[in-house]
């Protein structure tokens, strides 16, 4: 891989994660400051739609991981070169932090900037985030290994599952499924309570999806 190609991929990952956090957590912040105008359903749709759009816009550039857990999961599945893991994750976290920093300037009255926090116990959210990311990663692995038709529908499938999971689990765990998405607002606001959940559970869920996908992949039997 030449330097120019790597640079394009890193820019794509940084930009994509910026868009995800800016639009997704931005929807949370706008909903907060406007007294619920966006609504929970609107927030979930925003996350799903922005991911769907980014998959089609950036998929051919970097694969549109925009999520450290996804990068690690794809690497474990042999679909991402190990040498790309650290640069991709750095770019994703950098883009996410830039988005949260911009939201801080736009909405200084927001105390959390859309940070993810458990509504119940830590264990409840830990398990939820693990399962949510497991499901998401199975969908990603399935779509990325399919034929042309599956590839064409990848954005719809991946954006759809993110929106679906955010709809039902968002009020409990925040439905992060993405360490960069949770890390950025925590860093900018300096509120690190419960952050470990959103770093550990998505990565564990993404890695656990790899053997599960292997068991379900009929092409390997």
Image (cartoon, rainbow, N blue to C red):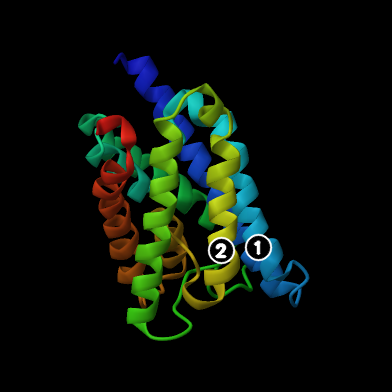
Of marks 1 and 2, the one in the foreground: 2
Q: Nearer the viewer, residue 41 or 192?
A: 41
Q: Quadrant of the C terminus?
A: top left
In the image shown, does 87 or 154 lie closer to the viewer? 154
Query: Which image quarter holds the N terminus?
Result: top left
Q: In this rendered view, identify the residue nearer to me: 82 or 166.
A: 166
For disc 2, the neighbor class at 10 Å (few under 14, some 14 to 19, many from 20) is many
Element carrying mark 2: helix
Label placed on residue 107? none
Q: What residue does disc 1 label?
A: 43
Picture disc at residue 166 = 2
x 54%, y 36%: residue? 154
Residue 47 picture location, percent across and down: 60, 54
- How many marks do you count on the picture? 2
Where in the figure is residue 161, as x and y percent of width and height? Answer: 54, 53
Q: CA distance from mark 1 to mark 2?
A: 8 Å
Mark 1 and mark 2 residues within 8 Å of each other at the beta carbon: yes
**Vertical relation: 188 (above or below) 155:** below
117 left or right, relative to 53: left
Give percent across and percent down for residue 216: 32, 44
Write the residue at 31% across / 58% down.
205
Q: Is residue 186 left or right of residue 78?
A: right
The answer to whether residue 139 is visible is yes
Q: Does residue 113 lie above or below 64 as drawn? A: below
Looking at the picture, how far across and down is residue 147, in whole percent? 47, 24
Residue lying furthest bottom: 120
Is residue 66 among the parts visible in the rendering? Answer: no
Q: Is residue 36 left or right of residue 139?
A: right
**Sequence-wise first label, 1 or 2:** 1
- Is residue 107 placed above or below 179 in the rendered structure? below
Q: Residue at x 42, y 55 (%)?
A: 135
Q: Secondary structure at mark 1?
A: helix
């Amino acid at each position: 891989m030449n330097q120019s190609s790597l640079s394009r991929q890193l820019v794509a990952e940084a930009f994509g994660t910026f868009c995800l956090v800016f639009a997704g957590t931005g929807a949370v912040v706008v909903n907060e400051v406007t007294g619920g105008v966006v609504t929970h359903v609107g927030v979930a749709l925003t996350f799903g739609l922005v991911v769907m759009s980014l998959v089609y816009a950036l998929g051919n550039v970097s694969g549109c991981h925009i999520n450290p857990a996804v990068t690690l999961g794809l690497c474990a599945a042999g679909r991402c070169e190990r040498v790309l893991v650290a640069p991709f994750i750095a770019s994703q976290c950098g883009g996410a932090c830039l988005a949260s920093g911009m939201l801080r300037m736009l909405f200084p009255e927001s105390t959390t900037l859309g940070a993810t926090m458990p509504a119940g116990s830590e264990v409840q959210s830990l398990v939820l985030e693990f399962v949510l990311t497991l499901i998401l990663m199975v969908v990603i692995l399935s779509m990325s290994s399919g034929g042309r038709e599956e590839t064409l529908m990848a954005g719809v499938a991946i954006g759809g599952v993110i929106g679906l999971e955010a709809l039902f689990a968002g009020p409990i765990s925040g439905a992060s499924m993405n360490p960069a998405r949770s890390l950025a607002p925590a860093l900018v606001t300096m509120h690190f309570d419960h952050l470990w959940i959103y770093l550990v559970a998505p990565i564990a869920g993404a890695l656990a999806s790899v053997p599960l996908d292997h068991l379900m992949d009929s092409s390997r039997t």
